Amino acid sequence: MTQVDDFEAPSTDGTFKLSDHAGHPVVLYFYPKDNTPGCTTEGAAFRDLYPKFRKLGAAVAGISRDSLKSHENFKAKMEFPFPLISDPDEKLCRQFDVIRMKNMYGKQVRGIERSTFVIDGRGNLVREWRKVKVPGHAEEVLEFVKTLER
């Protein structure tokens, strides 16, 4: 298990600091862009399961390179009950190594590879998903969080 370095970053709910969630699991899902089909579907799945994550004591946060303003609009439109973290300087993207070269309309572009990380209450990275396919993903994450010690 890898200890995750504490971080703080601007979010739609003020500054998100990992250490503020000590003692509880944290689900961080990185997604490419606000208001795009896959990201909207993924966010909605986490939103719909959020009460179950909370029942398990887990915090959930979405992360992309979008601005706080973009996040605030996306969060309001989608009624997300969890914060969206803005990472325009890619500090968290680098910490979790999610930036990849991707093909976009035949061009190579740098972007976020859809990824999810679960950090346990002691700050250890206990599970990661890379190259996430959206359908069923949030449910799979929830099932994993259920297996963690409380």
Image (cartoon, rainbow, N blue to C red):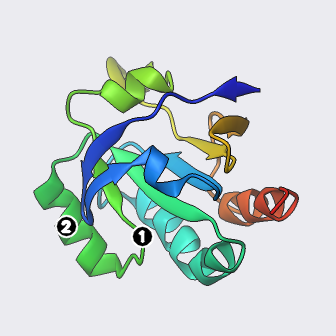
Q: Residue 54, how many percent across, how many down? A: 61, 76
Earlier-in-chain disc, 1 versus 2: 2
Residue at (57% x, 30% y) in the render:
4
Q: Are marks 1 and 2 in contact (CB under 8 Å)?
A: no
Q: Residues within 10 Å of mark 2 (few under 14, many from 20)?
A: many
Q: Residue 98, how many percent across, how many down? A: 48, 27
Residue at (29% x, 27% y) in the render:
90
Q: Residue 34, how many percent across, how many down? A: 29, 56
What label does residue 82 carry, if any?
1
**Image quadrant of residue 32?**
top left
Residue at (64% x, 27% y) in the render:
3
Residue at (56% x, 69% y) in the render:
46
Q: Secondary structure at mark 1?
A: loop
Say which of 11 and 97 sits in front.
Answer: 11
Q: Is residue 3 left or right of residue 34?
A: right
Amino acid tagged 1: Phe
| Residue furthest out toward the left | 69
Say which of 40 and 17 sits in front.
Answer: 17
Q: Secondary structure at mark 2?
A: helix
Q: Residues within 10 Å of mark 1 (few under 14, many from 20)?
A: some
Q: Is residue 13 left or right of residue 136?
A: left
Reading the image, the residue beneath label 2 is 72
Above or below for 117 versus 142: above
**Disc 1 to disc 2, how far (Cα)?**
11 Å
Q: Is residue 105 visible?
A: no
